[in-house]
Amino acid sequence: MKFEEIKDLTVAELRKRALDAREELFDMKMKHSLGQLASPSEITTKRKAIARMKTALSSKVKSSRGQK
């Protein structure tokens, strides 16, 4: 998911998607440790997607605090 797509989401959607992505990352790590993950590079991709979501979420929270 690209940052352009992520920045248009609401705070609640970002939190939910970040939580889901973290759960998927956990499952990927478990599969990787068991040797069942087809492509280990998917872990890196998922970590970067989570970082993008966290970045967008923190900027939205900071901007909403500044508007009060």
Image (spheres, grey):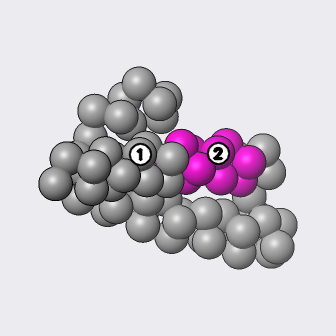
Number of numbered discs overlaid on the protein picture: 2
Magenta-drawn stretch contains 51:
yes
The residue under label 1 is 59
Q: Do the CB atoms of the residues marked 1 and 2 lie less than 8 Å apart? A: no
Q: Residue at x 71, y 53 (%)?
A: 43
> What residue is rendered at 28% in x and 49% in y?
66
**Main SS category, magenta section:** helix
- Apparent side of residue 64 relative to residue 45 in the rendered image (left or right): left
Residue 47 at x, y = what percent? 65, 53
Front residue of this view, candidates 39 and 45: 45
Q: Residues within 10 Å of mark 2 (few under 14, many from 20)?
A: few
**Which dot, 1 or 2, sits closer to the camera?**
1
Name the residue nearer the viewer: 23 or 30.
23
Q: Is residue 18 in view from this perspective?
A: yes
Residue type at mark 2 is Lys
- Residue indicated by mark 2: 48
Label 2 sits on a secondary structure element that is: helix
Query: 52 above or below 4?
Result: below
Q: Residue at x 78, y 65 (%)?
A: 32
User: Would you say residue 35 sits in the magenta stretch?
Assistant: no
Residue 20 drawn at (x, y percent): 42, 63
Q: Which residues are magenta?
A: 43-53
Which label sits on residue 38? none
Question: Could you tell me if residue 38 is visible in this image?
Answer: no
Residue 31 appears at what percent x and percent y? 71, 69
18 to the left or right of 29:
left
Vertical placement of 49 versus 37: above or below? above
| Residue under the image location 38 percent in, 36 percent down | 6
Return the disc, 1 or 2, that comes first in the chain's sequence.
2
Against 48, residue 28 (above or below) is: below
Residue 45 drawn at (x, y percent): 67, 43
